[in-house]
Image (cartoon, rainbow, N blue to C red):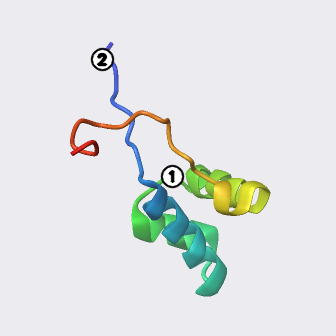
């Protein structure tokens, strides 16, 4: 059995995906299909934005060597 790499999405991507569900009038499923991501991710992201507002998706706190430059 192979270990699958998890796909990671940036904070900006998540916020834009959530924003699209809020302002376009499209369903969560439609936006998820357009962005090629599982619909449950988008529901989870929306819930986090609703709970934490601007503090949503703070990241892991780890910086890459490129970010330190």
Tell whether label 2 touches label 1 (CB within 8 Å): no
Nearest the camera: 37 or 17? Answer: 17
Nearest the camera: 46 or 3? Answer: 46
What residue lies at 69% left-to-right and 60% top-to-bottom?
49
Which quarter of the rendered picture does the C terminus lie within? top left
Placement of 60 over or under 25, stated as above or below: above
Q: Which residue is mark 2?
A: 2
Left/right placement of residue 53 relative to residue 11 reads right
Nearest the camera: 55 or 29? Answer: 55
Q: Residue furthest bottom?
A: 24
Left/right placement of residue 65 relative to residue 47 reads left
Which corner quadrant of the image does residue 68 belong to? top left
Q: Are there few (<14), some (14-19), or many (20+) residues within 10 Å of tag 1?
A: few
Which quarter of the rendered picture does the N terminus lie within? top left
Placement of 36 over or under 30, stated as above or below: above
Residue 27: give x, y in percent of width and height: 63, 75
What residue lies at 45% left-to-right and 63% top-to-bottom?
12
Q: Which residue is mark 1?
A: 38
Secondary structure at numbered mark 1 = loop
Placement of 29 over or under 4, stated as above or below: below
Placement of 33 over or under 2, stated as above or below: below
Q: CA distance from mark 1 to mark 2?
A: 21 Å
What residue lies at 58% left-to-right and 75% top-to-bottom?
19
Q: Residue furthest top?
A: 1
Left/right placement of residue 15 relative to residue 4 reads right
Q: Residue furthest right?
A: 51
Which corner quadrant of the image does residue 21 belong to? bottom right
Residue 36: give x, y in percent of width and height: 40, 60
Nearest the camera: 30 or 11? Answer: 11
Secondary structure at numbered mark 2 = loop
First along the sequence among labels 1 and 2: 2
């Amino acid at each position: 059995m192979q270990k699958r790499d998890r796909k990671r999405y940036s904070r900006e991507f998540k916020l834009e995906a959530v924003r699209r569900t809020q302002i376009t009038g499209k369903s969560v499923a439609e936006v998820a299909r357009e962005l090629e991501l599982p619909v449950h991710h988008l529901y989870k992201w929306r819930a986090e934005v609703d709970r934490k507002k601007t503090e949503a998706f703070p990241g892991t706190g780890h910086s890459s060597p490129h970010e330190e430059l």
